[in-house]
Amino acid sequence: MSLRPRPGHPTALLVGTGRGAQMGILIKGPEVLESTRRVDTVVLDKTGTVTTGRMTLVAAVTTDDTARADLLRLAGATEDASEHPIAQAIAKGATQEVGALSTALGFANIEGRGVTATVDGVDVLVGRESLLDERGVVVPDALRSIKAEEEKKGRTVVLAAWEGRARGLLVVADTVRPPARRRCGG
C-alpha cells in the first residue's frame, strides 16, 4: 500500500486511517473516513466486543423499610436456582456481599417475566414490573424512578418483592472492557 496521498486524499485522511488501523479499527479508505463528518449516530455490536460479555450486579436499591442484606439474601437465593445469565449475576453478586445463600424451595420460572421461590420461609418474587403488577404488588414511585434512570443507561433492572410488597430492585449490566474504555476515552 502506498502512503503517498492520491489526488483528492489529503495526508490527514491517510494518517487517520493508519492510526485507526493501529487501534484495531478498520477503515476501508479515506473516502469513508471523510464521510464520517456527517455521521450523527454510531451503533455497535457491543456484547463481547466493547464489553466483557458477562453480566454483573452493579447496584441494589431497597425501600426504606428493607435492609440491603435481606434484599440480596432473599433475591439472590431465589435467582440462584435459575440458569439465566441475569439471575446468575444477581446470585453471584449477592454471594459476594452476604456470603452463602440459602436454598430456594418451590422454585418456579415464569417465562420471560421472572421467578418465584420460598427462601427461609419467605415467599419471594423476583422479576419484571409486569409480573409484580400481575401479582397485585404495587411498586413505589421512588423505585419506579430509579428503575427508569437505570434503564436509560442501558442497564437491566429486576424488582424483588415479598410479603406482598416491593422491597427493592437489582441492577445488572455488562461491563465495558478496559481496553475499550481506554480507546473510547472513558
Image: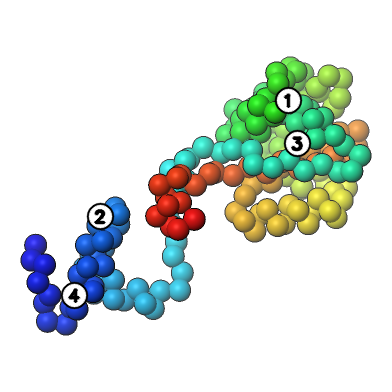
- Please identify the quarter of the rendering in which residue 10 is found: bottom left
How far apart marks 3 and 2 lie (CA) works out to 46 Å
Instruction: State the residue position of label 1.
Output: 98
Residue under the image location 71 percent in, 37 percent down: 114
Of badges 3 and 1, nearer the viewer stands 1
Residue at label 4? 11
Q: What element carries label 1?
A: helix
**Residue at 9% over, 62% down:** 1
User: Separation of disc 2 and disc 4 at Cα?
Assistant: 17 Å
Mark 3 lies on a secondary structure that is: strand
Residue type marked 1: Val
Q: In this view, does 53 lie to the left or right of 172?
A: left
Residue at 82% across, 41% down:
62
**What is the spatial separation of the Cα atoms under label 1 and label 4, in whole angstroms?**
58 Å
Residue 22's disc number: 2
Q: Foreground residue, 13 or 164?
A: 13
Compared to residue 92, the image places residue 44 above or below, namely below
Dot 2 or dot 4: first in sequence order is 4
Q: What residue type is labelled 3?
A: Val
Label 3: which residue?
Answer: 126
The span from disc 3 to disc 4 (Cα, nearest Å) is 57 Å
Callout 4 secondary element = helix
What is the x, y in percent for residue 22? 25, 55
Quadrant position of residue 26: bottom left
Q: Which amino acid does label 4 sit on?
A: Thr
